[in-house]
């Protein structure tokens, strides 16, 4: 089963699009932004799940890298 949260590749202007089950949550420019999006989507303790591949899939770059 695929991870429900996807942090997409780095955009040319910076930031990474974040989706949960295909729904766009926002453009993260830091791990803090990502945590805020995931909390708003109802995930409890999202900071504990950022490195768990069963929860978060980091595509097209290093995990936690959100700036150009």
Image (cartoon, helix red, strand yellow):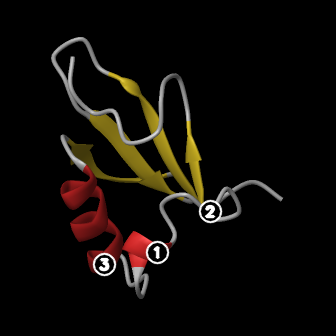
Quarter of the image where the N terminus is located = bottom right
Query: Residue at horizontal 24%, vertical 11%?
Result: 12
Above or below 7: residue 54: below
Cα distance in 3D space between marks 2 and 1: 8 Å
Circle 1 sits in a helix, a strand or a loop, which is it? helix
Q: Position of residue 30 (x, y in %)?
A: 21, 46
Disc 2 is placed on an element classified as loop
| Left or right placement of residue 25 versus residue 48 in this view | left
Seen from the viewer's position, the closer of residues 61 and 1 is 61
Q: Residues within 10 Å of mark 1 (few under 14, many from 20)?
A: few
- Residue 48 tag number: 1
Mark 2: give few (<14), some (14-19) or many (20+) Cα within 10 Å.
few
User: Where does residue 64 sit, x and y in percent of width and height?
Assistant: 37, 42
From the top left corner, tell me how far across and down residue 22 is, in percent. Answer: 53, 52
State the residue position of label 2.
52
Q: Which label lies toward us, 3 or 2?
A: 2
Distance from label 3 to label 2 (Cα)? 16 Å
């Amino acid at each position: 089963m695929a991870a429900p949260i996807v942090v997409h590749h780095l955009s040319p202007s910076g930031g990474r699009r974040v989706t949960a089950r295909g729904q766009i949550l926002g453009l993260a420019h830091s791990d803090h932004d990502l945590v805020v999006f995931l909390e708003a989507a109802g995930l409890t303790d999202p900071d504990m799940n950022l490195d768990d591949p069963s929860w978060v899939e980091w595509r097209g770059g290093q995990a936690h890298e959100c700036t150009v």
